[in-house]
Image (cartoon, helix red, strand yellow):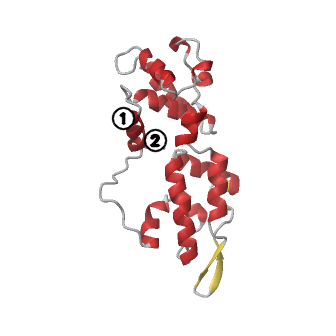
Amino acid sequence: MIDVKQLTKIMKKYDLQSIEGLLLAHCAFMANEQHPEYLEFIKIILDQLGKGKFSKDSVQEMVDKGIIDGRFIKTPDDLNFANIYLTDEFQEAYYVDSNTAGEELWDAYPNTTIIDGRSVILKKGEKIGDTYWDKDALILMYSKKIGSNKELHQSIVSKIKKAKELGVLNFTLRSFIFDEMWGSLDDLIGVSKPLNDNRTII
């Protein structure tokens, strides 16, 4: 997923001229995180180079400001999926890799809950269609759903731990991820949402 609100906030913080460059960097990171569908986004963005909306100067600007690692780019003309990498500092500030996010979610989520006096398993493999959704598949889907957004992930895990303490989580982990049920965690743990948090996900 692409969190437009997050990228807009980063664009303003780094005083960038356009959001297209950040979209390029984001998609390159996600493609490297085993989400090949982002390669099509990269192709579309690179096609905009030199066509007015997205200039080669924007690439150099992100290199100069420590967003894209310039060691792998000879010239902006050589940009492709294989040489677009975030700097370690920028990645550490805004992104969480798939395995780390998935393991932290898995560890935080309750194994079971009690419904109508019966113990119900919440973390289990399930086959839907031709896909068996085991731990590895769920971890990859979670990373894709949150766009590897470190701030969002940390918020989700923190609220899950609180909900676990309160004993109010009663849906399977697969449902939690597929239906993006982290949006209901505030209601479950009794936290008021900011009135101006209109996050846009595409």
Residue 169 image offset from top left, x and y in percent: 55, 72
- Point out the residue furthest to the left here: 195
The span from disc 1 to disc 2 (Cα, nearest Å) is 17 Å
Task: Point out the tag, 1 or 2, that comes first from the N-terminus.
Answer: 2
Is residue 189 placed above or below 52 in the rendered structure? below
Q: Is residue 130 above or below residue 84?
A: below
The one of 146 and 35 positioned closer to us in this rendering: 146
Q: Residue at x 51, y 64 (%)?
A: 159
Secondary structure, mark 1, is helix
Q: Can residue 94 be seen in this view?
A: yes
Residue hosting label 2: 2
Q: Do the residues labelled 1 and 2 touch (CB within 8 Å)?
A: no
When asked about the image quadrant of residue 118, the answer is: bottom right
The image position of residue 94, as x and y in percent, is: 52, 42
Residue at the image point whose x is 58% and y is 72% from the top: 164
193 and 131: which is toward the camera:
193
What amino acid does circle 1 point to?
Answer: Lys
Q: Residue 12 carries which label?
A: 1
Q: Is residue 109 above or below residue 47?
A: below
Which residue is at 53% across, 71% downward? Answer: 163
Q: What residue type is labelled 2?
A: Ile
